C-alpha cells in the first residue's frame, strides 16, 4: 500500500473505532446540530491558523504521507478532515464515558 494514504486511513480508523460509542447516552451523531456547533467553529479557527502558517512557510506537510488533494488555500484535505474527525471522536468518547460514569453514580 502506498504511504500517501496513511493519514486518510488513520482518520477513517479513528471514526470506525469510536463509532460504537454512539450507542451510549444522548449520542453525538443523533444530535448533529449540537455537534456541528461544537466542532465547526474550532475547526475554522485552526484551519485559518494552518493556512497562515502554510503561506508563511512555517508549517509544511510531507507529500509522501498525504493524498495530494488540497482545499483552497493550499490545505491538504487530510488536515481539514483532521480538524473534524478528531474532535468528533473526542466528543463520542466524552459522551460515552460521561454516560457510563453516571450509570455508576445511580447505583
Image (cartoon, rainbow, N blue to C red):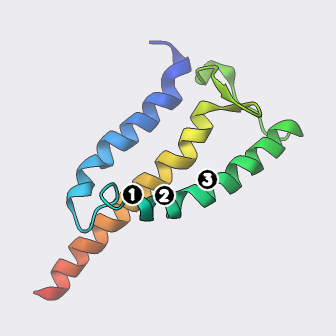
Name the side, left or right, on which 1 lies relative to 53. left
- Number of numbered discs: 3
Give the CA separation, mark 1 to mark 2: 6 Å
Please name the residue shown 30% across and 73% down the image.
Answer: 98
Mark 3 neighbour density, 10 Å: few (under 14) some (14–19) many (20 or more): some
Q: CA distance from mark 3 to mark 1?
A: 16 Å
Q: Is residue 102 above or below residue 21?
A: below
1 and 2 marks in contact (CB < 8 Å): yes
Between label 3 and label 1, give the one nearer the viewer. Answer: 1
- Looking at the image, the residue that sits furthest to the left is 107
Q: Residues within 10 Å of mark 2 (few under 14, many from 20)?
A: some
65 is higher (above) or lower (below) than 19:
above
Extreme residue in the bottom direction: 106
Q: Which residue is mark 1?
A: 32
Residue 79, given in percent of the width and then of the height, sits at 61, 38
Q: Position of residue 97 (x, y in %)?
A: 29, 68
**Residue 50 image offset from top left, x and y in percent:** 74, 45
For the residue labelled by badge 1, is the local secondary structure a helix, a strand or a loop? helix
Q: Is residue 73 left or right of residue 79?
A: right
Q: Quadrant of the N terminus?
A: top left
SS for tag 3?
helix
Residue 43 image label: 3
User: Residue extending furthest front?
Assistant: 33
In this rendering, position of residue 36 left or right of residue 79: left
Say which label, 3 or 1, has the lower sequence index.
1
| Label 2 SS | helix
Q: Which residue is mark 2?
A: 36
Amino acid at each position: 500500500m502506498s504511504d500517501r494514504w496513511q493519514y486518510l486511513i488513520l482518520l477513517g480508523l479513528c471514526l470506525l473505532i469510536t463509532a460504537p460509542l454512539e450507542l451510549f447516552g444522548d449520542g453525538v451523531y443523533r444530535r448533529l446540530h449540537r455537534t456541528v456547533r461544537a466542532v465547526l467553529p474550532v475547526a475554522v479557527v485552526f484551519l485559518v491558523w494552518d493556512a497562515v502558517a502554510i503561506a508563511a512557510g512555517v508549517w509544511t506537510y510531507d507529500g509522501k504521507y498525504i493524498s495530494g488533494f488540497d482545499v483552497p488555500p493550499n490545505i491538504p484535505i487530510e488536515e481539514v478532515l483532521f480538524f473534524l474527525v478528531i474532535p468528533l471522536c473526542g466528543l463520542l468518547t466524552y459522551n460515552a464515558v460521561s454516560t457510563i460514569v453516571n450509570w455508576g453514580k445511580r447505583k
